[in-house]
Amino acid sequence: MAHGGTSGTCTPQGLAHAPQFDQACNAYVTDNNNVNSDATGGNIAVAVGLAATAGFVVYWLVADKGDEGKSAGRTPVVTPLVGRSLGGLSVSASF
C-alpha cells in the first residue's frame, strides 16, 4: 500500500494494525452486515412464496371439487359437425 507500508484486513473489530482506517473499515463491515441481512430477508420471502405456491397446488389437486353432477353442465362441450354441406365444430356450455 502507498500509505507508509500499512496493511491489514477488515475484521468485525476494525482494521487490524492500521488505526487510521478504523472508520472506513467499520463502515465497510456495517454495510456488509446490512447486505447480509437484506439477503436473508429476500431468501425468507422466496421460501415463503415457494411454500405458499406448493400449498396451493396440493390443495388444488386434493380439494373436494363439489358435486360432480353440478359441474358437468358447466364444462364446455366441443362436438364435431359433419354433413353434406356442413363441417366444423360446435361449442356449447351452460351457466
Image: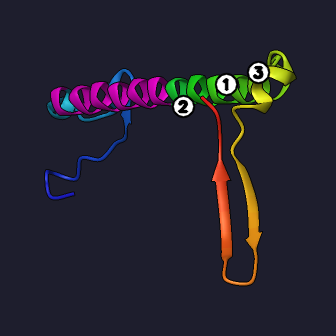
SS for callout 1: helix
**Quick check: 22 left or right of 86?**
left
Q: Which residue is mark 3?
A: 59
Earlier along the polypeptide chain: callout 2 or callout 3?
A: 2
Identify the residue at horizontal 64%, vertical 33% (top origin): 94
Say if the magenta span includes residue 25.
yes
Quadrant that contains the N terminus: bottom left
- 62 sits left or right of 48 in the view: right
Viewer-nearest residue: 16 or 74: 74
Q: Earlier in the sequence, mark 2 or mark 1?
A: 2
Q: Nearer the viewer, mark 2 or mark 1?
A: 1
Callout 3: 10 Å neighbours few (<14), some, many (20+)? Answer: few
Answer whether residue 91 is magenta in the image: no
Marks 2 and 1, how far apart at CA: 9 Å
Magenta-highlighted residues = 23-42
Q: Residue 16, percent across and down?
A: 34, 32
For residue 7, side relative to residue 67 (left or right): left
- How far apart are labels 2 and 3 at the CA level? 20 Å
